Image: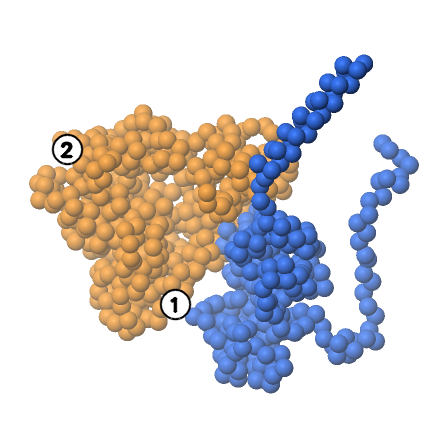
Amino acid sequence: MPNPVQVAIPLLQHTGAPCEPLVKVKDEVTLGQKIGEGKGFITAPVHASVAGAVGMPSVTTLPNGRHVKTIPIKTGPNQLSADELKASLLGGDWPVSGLDAQSPEQIAQTAREAGLVGLGGAAFPTHVKLTRNEKRPVDTLLLNGCECEPYLTSDYRLMIEFPRPIVTGALLAARATGATQLVIAVEDNKPAAVESLRRAAEGTGVEVRVMETRYPMGGERQVIPAALDREVPTGGLPLDVGVVVMNVGTSAALAAAVLRGKTLTHRVVSVTGAGIAQPKNVLAPIGSSYKDLIDFCGGLKPDAARVIAGGPMMGFALNDLNITVTKGTSGITVLTHDDLKAVEETACVRCGRCVDVCPLNLVPTRLALASRYQDWDMARRYHLMACCECGCCAYVCPAAIPLVQLMRMGKAQLPKE
Amino acid sequence: MLLAGGTMLVMAIVAGYTLGWANKVFHVAVDPRIEAINAALPGANCGGCGCVGCMSYAEAVAGGKIAPDKCTVGGSSCAQAIAKIMGVDLKPSWPYRPVVHCRAHYAERLGRADYRGEKTCTGANLVGGVQGCTYGCLGFGDCVAACNYDAIHVVDGLATVDYDKCIGCGACEKACPRHIISMTPFKSQRIIAVGCSNQDMGKDVKAVCKIGCVGCMACSKASPIFKMTEGKIPRINYDEYDPENMDATLLAVKKCPVKNLIYVGKPSPEHVEAVKDQEKPKIVQVDFKTTVDQAEWRG
């Protein structure tokens, strides 16, 4: 994708503390230069995704409607072309041996400096996962190639086109965490990705395991039991069962950061759905607007009805295309009128379908009621905070109760114990 | 007969002495002020003071943990009574009442999405873009649900306080997910307040609301009690607000290009005088007496 005229780099793109700007207005920045740094452990710096001049700091809207401070950068004349960029970030040859030159601490430190966060969507800072913890040793590194959200194919394309940086990144992450077992989990509806990864992983000890295709296989609490037969306790972390889970995109970015000194400035975004003229996977600079991406993909079709940040299950419906691509943006889905149905909410008929489909074995109908009537004792008893907001319950609900929204509402309001 | 009577008598004497002894030995000293304070409180158990109920507030006051003037329902007379029980001098304080820092009805603000989710402000606030302004009143009435006194209503999409009924418990302030309701000291029946919360730049405000604050700073230039915050919205410093000396403040009100500095509160006598010719809306008094006991039908 060509560089947009201007990018706006939000200072908060990750889970954790927001960043403070490091540059002033009219400063000239180069591609990949660090422009914001946060305080604390759970944070990640942000970097310039184009070379150019810094503009007046302003405010931009994220898909969830929150306003964050941003640093706009006006694109200068000297830019890498899209192909050069792709080659420098992902292409070429990636070593699979001789990675011992990097100490585990160095790898984690590089991940932090490069601003790496989980590219699956939650944007949790990667260096936190890669820092060794003596009390909780890690034996397995699981690379998550299960892209379960319908429509989205960004990880799929990455796995087919660039399996080698993924494998190299996995080896680096394993070295950082001390994991001895390396598994890449891919769903069985992506045979081309499995094939490509198997070829790249030959002789490296990385195992590619094929999973059943089932939403939400991409959630770490779903993929760990499926791939490793270990159950993550409710309220616990994968670390409790000796596992670190990383998205395949994060792995490729880690390889680029450690071996080529690249910071996280671009990511693969699926621009997809029946309402888009030419659906594509785009290597987009972070900070470009959704409008830039949609225009690059031929614009919206006349019958486009709803633009969603992310996939149709967990994404946010948008009312404005002037939204910024962040490190956590995995896709833009445009649905048409045919895809949508408007159903009025009716009373719960106690059919129990939501209970059947909940991947975490929760009772969504109870949780939603507790949340609606602010019964926090009940919400705790039924483990409201364990809900991953995957949307299965709301999808099957015959009464069209906005279950996920009620969960989110409850989680936002639940008083601290 | 005699034996039975004698036994009862002996048991009565023994039990009586035991109870009397237990009463002395196991006596729990209760601060008599707690009971007195509780009696002086209105017993609304609204939680506006921050305690669980009136009794727990009485205990906290007697224990010296909280000031005696925190009961908003009782007002100044209640505070004086409690201060007398506690033997302290009470500085006069102003009644705190909620002010909604938004004045945009449906007609004035840009509605955006066809919202079909949960019909509460907390729910709508989680979804970006139910309406254009991401700061202003959502109008689903979480504050109305929180109010125990029927003193706040959503009128044409905007939460509106009924200052005749409001006792200032602060429940609406806590319920608002956008935090646009603030408890404000009412130094007179009506005070000036800022009727907007939007912290964006003027152009962005204009795009979503016809009457939002554009951050021109005219008010802060006219009167020092208006302080511009980092978010480009003025805040009134009510410590310096003086209802007797309003010249500079009224100048600021006049200068405001979007007329966003508004009077809130009960109208003054002069104001009532000005509209006395107009027909008053009929107010139905709610009768809390139940009629069940007089009913013949007992289904």
Q: According to the colouring, which chain is orange?
A: A
Instruction: Determine the residue positioned at 24% across, 70% down.
Output: A28
Is residue A52 at all visible to an observer of this figure? no
Q: Which type of secondary structure does the marked residue at label 2 adopt?
A: loop
Coordinates of residue A269 in the picture (x, y in percent): 34, 49
Coordinates of residue A370 in the picture (x, y in percent): 56, 38
Q: In this view, does B271 lie to the left or right of B38?
A: right
Instruction: Determine the residue positioned at 62% across, 36% down.
Output: B23
Q: Label 2 amino acid? A: Thr
Instruction: Determine the residue positioned at 79% across, 49% down.
Output: B288
Return the residue nearer the eye: B158 or B273: B273
Measure the alpha-carbon separation of dots 1 and 2: 47 Å
Instruction: Determine the residue positioned at 35% across, 71% down.
Output: A56
Q: Which type of secondary structure does the marked residue at label 1 adopt?
A: strand
Q: Label 1 amino acid? A: Ser
Coloring scheme of the render? by chain
Coordinates of residue B46 in the picture (x, y in percent): 63, 52
Q: Is residue A74 left or right of residue B97?
A: left
Q: Residue furthest right?
A: B296
B270 shown above or below A205 = below
B2 shown above or below B15 = above
Q: Are marks 1 and 2 on the same chain?
A: yes
Residue linked to disc 1: A58
**Counting other residues with Cα less than 10 Å from the Cα at mark 2, is it few (<14), some (14-19), or many (20 or more)?**
few
| Lower sequence index among marks 1 and 2 | 1
Residue linked to disc 2: A204
Return the residue nearer the eye: B130 or A266: B130
Q: According to the colouring, which chain is blue?
A: B
